[in-house]
Each structure stands twice: as structure tokens, then as C-alpha cells.
Image (cartoon, rainbow, N blue to C red):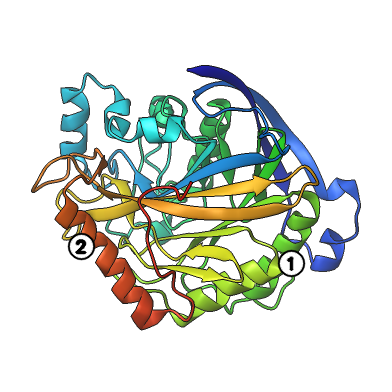
């Protein structure tokens, strides 16, 4: 195992201003809020290849929801499992952490809050689920090589603005990068800065936001401005319809707009179901990675999902290319018939084929630019 030094940068990026302000070129548009130095254990070499190029491996997963609901008094089975594991929250990552440790960056959608607050805003009290977990369990990220999270979804505000602010502070203090619609997360690895942006879409596509006529305009301006400053831009969207295995027209429009605006990778969540992958203008759009580690349901009707990995090659001139992707089919549990909140790679060949065939079939039916194959291994 090799030690490497990683700088995690969380950058306050006030993206609510019009595009003219963002594109002004003034350095004040981006201000460093915090710099956290992280020691990480990794098996990936920092040494450039013989031709001077650098390869960066990025891993992305679906929804990470842990804990319970202290408002509706739900979540007993999750906490029973936590007690069974001596309150070591890393039991949830036991079967996937080695995957994360061997990459350069792991990005997940954290859908919940790190807070003990019982305050619930009025507009949330009618919701079926409200998620929280004690801040001490942020180690689920920091102890398992999860370097970045998207914080733009329909559960990060379950305990109001104070709960959200506490969640951000807890994550920041753990040395993990976060991003939302107003703050860019930047991760520095092998001398390359990777910028991450996140947006909650669902019913917001055509609504005015922050001086823009709609979310499409804001996203395009944000990405273009970010791409001017950072070589790799990853955009996460919380979008789509729950339990749908394919994207809506709005998702496809937004995902392709993100690519046209400069995104190098687009990652989607929210449907709790895996969606097919599209390759548009040489960029992968993962419309939904489904659930990953999900305490919101003790026995979901579909516990299949997958982890997505891709590699970026940066040559000595600084030009970036994508060298392909692979998937790691998983179930969100290590058990056969119920959820134990421990995502586990699938090893049964027939079950792997079932996951791949579902992705292929839905890609052919619903996408204009579906990938033709879902490789399990790197081509090299």
C-alpha cells in the first residue's frame, strides 16, 4: 500500500449570479472557503506514465442514505444492525471499500443529514421519510475512501437550514469534499483539479432561478464558467421519477446540455432504480445509479444496482480524454431476501447478466445514444 497526499478543496462558488458576472474573469467569483489536507492510503500510482500522461480513476455510486427518522420514529432495523456491528458504521462499506481505496476519487450522493436535530420545517412534516444520523457517523465517508459527496437532493433539508448547515460543517471537518448548486467541490489528485457541481432538478427545470429564466440557463452558465477554471468537471443531477428505469425527456435535455456546456461526466440519482448509460459527444451520462446503501427501506422490491467507474487520461500537454468505463454490478444488501445495508458486488454470472441486460434493453428503448456494452473489466 502506498501513502499519498491529497488536497481536498471546498470552494464557495456563488452560482446564483447571472452569467455575465461569472464570466467576467474576476478572481473574486471563486473564493477558497477551506483547504483540508488529507492523508489517504491508495494503491494507485502517482507516477506519470512513460509518455508523461496521468490517468485518474473516478468511482460513482447511487444514493447513500444511512440512519433513521427521528421525527416519525423510524429506522429501528438499521440501528439494530448498527448495534449488531458494535456501532461501527463502516459495516455498511465492508464489501466495497477496497474498490474505493483503489481509485483516485469516489463520489456518492449523500441523501440525508448529519444532525441530531428534531426540528422539521412545515413544508417537510407531511413527508413519509425524513432522514438523519448522528454526526459522529460521518466516518462512513472518511474511513472508507469516499472523498466527495453531492449535497443536492430532496432530503438534505429534512431538518431545515440549520440541519443542512450542520451537515455541511460535519462533512467539511471530516476532510470530505461536498458540492451543491451554490458551492463547487474541488478535489486535487495527481496535480489535477476535479470540479464537482450538483443540482436538484425534479420539478425545477423551467422555473426561474437566481436571475436566470430557468434551471437550464443556470446550469449551462455554471458549467461553462467552471470549465474555464478547472480541467475536469463532473456534474451530479438529482432528477427523474421514482421507480422508473429510464430517464424523462427533461433529463435527457439537461444531461446533454451539461455535456455541451463543458461537463466531462454526468451522474444522476433519485429514481432508486438503475437507468441505462448514454455516450453523448464522447461523454458518459449515467441517468441513475439507483440505490447504493439505503436505510429508507428494509426490503426494496428491487435491490439490484451498480457502481460506475471511468478513467480520464491527461497527456503532458494537458489535453484530457476519457479512456472508457466499467460497471460493478451490486446488490444493496449482502443478504438474499432483506436489506442489511451492506452493498455487495454480485458474483453470480446469471444475476450479472440480468443487470446488464436490463441496462441494455432500456438503453435501446429510451436513449438516442446508448452505450452498446457494459464492460465489467478495463479494456487495458
Helix, strand or loop at mark 1: helix
Q: Does 47 sit above or below residue 304? A: above
Name the residue that disc number 1 marks: 221
Quadrant housing residue 301: bottom left
The residue that appears at 56% across and 17% down in the rendered structure is: 3
- How many numbered markers are drawn? 2
Q: Does 116 sit above or below residue 217? A: above
Front disc: 2 or 1? 2
Q: Position of residue 242 (x, y in %)?
A: 32, 68
Which residue is more in the foreground, 9 or 168?
9
Q: Position of residue 168 (x, y in %)?
A: 55, 38
Direction from residue 270 to residue 183 in the image, left or right:
right
Which residue is more in the foreground, 102 or 223?
102
Q: Position of residue 93 (x, y in %)?
A: 32, 33
Q: Earlier in the sequence, mark 2 or mark 1?
A: 1
The residue that appears at 69% across and 34% down in the rendered structure is: 50
Asked whether residue 173 is in view, the answer is: yes
The disc placed on residue 354 is 2
Direction from residue 65 to residue 174 in the image, left or right:
right
Q: Position of residue 335 (x, y in %)?
A: 12, 41
Quadrant housing residue 66: top left
Amino acid at each position: 500500500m502506498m501513502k499519498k497526499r491529497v488536497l481536498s478543496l471546498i470552494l464557495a462558488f456563488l452560482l446564483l449570479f447571472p452569467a455575465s458576472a461569472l464570466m467576467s474573469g474576476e478572481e473574486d467569483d471563486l473564493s477558497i472557503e477551506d483547504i483540508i489536507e488529507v492523508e489517504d492510503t491508495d494503491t494507485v500510482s502517482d507516477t506519470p506514465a512513460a509518455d508523461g500522461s496521468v490517468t485518474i480513476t473516478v468511482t460513482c455510486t447511487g444514493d447513500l442514505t444511512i440512519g433513521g427518522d427521528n421525527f416519525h420514529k423510524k429506522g429501528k432495523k438499521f440501528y439494530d444492525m448498527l448495534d449488531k456491528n458494535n456501532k461501527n458504521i463502516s459495516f455498511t462499506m465492508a464489501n466495497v471499500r477496497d474498490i474505493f481505496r483503489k481509485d483516485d476519487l469516489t463520489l456518492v450522493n449523500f441523501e440525508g443529514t448529519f444532525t441530531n436535530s428534531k426540528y422539521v420545517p412545515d413544508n417537510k412534516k407531511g413527508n413519509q421519510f425524513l432522514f438523519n444520523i448522528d454526526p459522529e457517523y460521518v466516518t462512513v465517508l472518511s474511513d472508507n475512501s469516499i472523498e466527495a459527496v453531492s449535497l443536492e437532493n430532496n432530503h438534505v433539508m429534512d431538518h431545515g437550514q440549520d440541519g443542512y448547515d450542520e451537515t455541511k460543517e460535519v462533512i467539511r471537518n471530516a476532510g470530505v469534499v461536498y458540492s451543491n448548486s451554490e458551492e463547487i467541490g474541488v478535489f486535487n489528485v495527481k496535480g489535477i483539479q476535479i470540479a464537482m457541481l450538483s443540482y436538484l432538478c425534479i420539478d425545477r427545470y423551467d422555473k426561474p432561478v437566481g436571475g436566470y429564466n430557468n434551471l437550464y440557463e443556470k446550469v449551462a452558465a455554471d458549467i461553462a464558467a467552471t470549465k474555464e477554471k478547472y480541467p475536469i468537471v463532473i456534474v451530479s443531477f438529482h432528477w427523474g421519477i421514482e421507480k422508473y428505469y429510464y430517464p424523462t425527456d427533461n433529463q435527457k435535455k439537461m444531461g446533454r446540455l451539461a455535456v455541451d456546456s463543458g461537463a466531462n461526466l454526468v451522474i444522476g440519482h433519485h429514481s432508486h432504480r438503475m437507468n441505462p448509460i448514454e455516450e453523448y459527444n464522447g461523454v458518459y451520462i449515467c441517468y441513475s445509479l439507483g440505490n447504493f446503501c439505503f436505510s429508507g427501506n428494509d426490503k426494496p422490491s428491487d435491490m439490484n444496482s451498480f457502481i460506475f467507474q471511468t478513467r480520464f487520461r491527461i497527456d503532458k500537454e494537458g489535453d484530457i480524454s476519457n479512456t472508457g468505463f466499467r460497471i460493478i454490478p451490486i446488490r444493496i444488501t449482502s443478504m438474499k431476501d432483506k436489506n442489511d445495508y451492506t452493498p455487495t458486488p454480485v458474483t453470480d454470472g446469471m444475476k450479472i447478466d440480468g443487470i446488464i441486460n436490463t441496462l441494455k434493453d432500456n438503453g435501446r428503448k429510451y436513449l438516442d445514444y446508448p452505450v452498446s456494452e457494459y464492460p465489467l473489466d478495463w479494456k487495458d
